Image (cartoon, grey):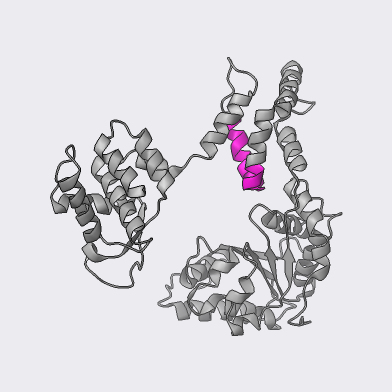
Amino acid sequence: MSKHKSGANCSAAGECVSEVSDVVKQHCVTCDCVFVVRHLLELLRRTAVHGESNSVLIVGPRGAGKTMLLSCALRELLDLQEVKKNVLLVQLSGLLQTDDRIALREITRQLHLENVVGDRVFGSFAENLVFLLEALKKGDKSSSRPVFFILEEFDLFAHHKNQTLLYNLLDVSQSAQTPVTVVGLTCRLDVLELLEKRVKSRFSHRQIHLLSSLSFCQYRDAFRSKLSLPDDFPDSKFSQDWNVSILKLCEDKSVDEILRKHFNSSTDFRSLHLLLLLAVSRVSVSNPTLRAADILEASRMSNADTKANILHGLSILELCLIIAMKHLNDTYEGEPFNFQMVHNEFKKFIQRKSHSIHNFEQPVVLKAFEHLLQLELIRPVDAGVCKVQREYQLMCLMLDQTQVMEALQRYPQCPTDVKQWASSAFG
């Protein structure tokens, strides 16, 4: 098996990064004309056909086309007659497989290794690992089926204890036994810095970078093309009227401003799809075409602040506790607080300024405080690290001043003294 030097980078791929990013984003990748897809395809083919183990990282921002690039290469690879029905594919995600034990069980499930051991239940992580490694290492590269390990959110696997899974997968890819290729997909440019020395030494250091070079004109053209109906649409009259309305919509200045705002926020086409989905859902029999007002409302809905919406459903007591927390943040310059500090601040307000809020007993106030914790409007600073009484556990507020003030303005029948207290707290 040919081994790759540690410093071997895919430098040529960097020259075609902009081309790949644009083509992938347009959702019309053609594997025959994009160099990076061909490069990745050749890497995978060497494993599938020649039994050569490899490892590679695909790095780029969300929506740049990392998954589509890999899917395109795999699809073309599996179309080859010499590869068809021979490759084993294992797909993991750092968001789902949150530790090595869960990841190992998922690997054995996807490789159907549980059928080999019958009803046996592994007693420990070590037994799982030993069994998997034995299964992967027995045989040789000429008789073993090649295995592709696809690790989505690769950087999250680096946070697993001792990076045991990564170490062993990359170690197997360095051996001359079962042909294995490990493909990691990540958004983090510094992902190699997260790896332990022993893990990094077993990685081939191949990287394919996808960087977005999408212009606003291309983004606007994609907006028009995704909304336009094809020529072979069954109702030609409706199709013609619809496409004319889309052209007029693209010339509307208010729509152009909304698109520019979304483009500046994110060039991820998934966010554009969400905007278009919300807009198209407003089309009805009485309103058969898209209007600028539909795009505006869709933009408002897609940019809605979920935490601010949660604030509208809180009780007056819970709202007062949040104001007390913001007051503490202003006083102590963002330092963490505990329930006792919030309760004292709330009691001061009751005694000095409030004539409309009932003086609740401490257990009631604590219950409201815990409800805010369940809603994740506040969170512990050291969750699960130090065991202290819940009244003294340090917390931080997950809201900013603007969110609280807007919630107060829109809160139905909010007492005037509470609003005045909030205004004084924010100074």
Residue 202 on the magenta segment: no
Closer to the camera in the image, 228 or 338:
338
Residue 148 is situated, as x and y percent measured from the top left of the image, at: 67, 67
184 relative to 277, above or below: below
Give residue 133's quadrant in the image: bottom right
Q: Residue furthest right?
A: 33
Residue under the point 30% across and 62% down = 337
Q: Which residues are magenta?
A: 262-280
266 relative to 73, above or below: above
1 relative to 370, above or below: below
Give residue 3's quadrant in the image: bottom right
The quarter of the image holding the N terminus is bottom right
Q: What is the magenta segment's predominant secondary structure?
A: helix
Residue under the point 35% across and 57% down = 329
Residue 277 on the magenta segment: yes
Give residue 184's quadrant in the image: bottom right
Residue 390 is situated, as x and y percent measured from the top left of the image, at: 23, 63
Seen in the image, is 161 located left or right of residue 145?
A: left
Residue under the point 75% across and 71% down = 47
Query: Can the viewer see residue 411?
Result: yes
Seen in the image, is 40 located left or right of residue 368?
A: right
Q: How many marks?
A: 0
Residue under the point 76% across and 19% down = 240
Closer to the camera in the image, 312 or 59:
312
Residue 50 is situated, as x and y percent measured from the top left of the image, at: 79, 74
Query: Can the viewer see residue 315?
Result: no
Residue 262 is situated, as x and y percent measured from the top left of the image, at: 63, 41
Closer to the camera in the image, 170 or 313:
313
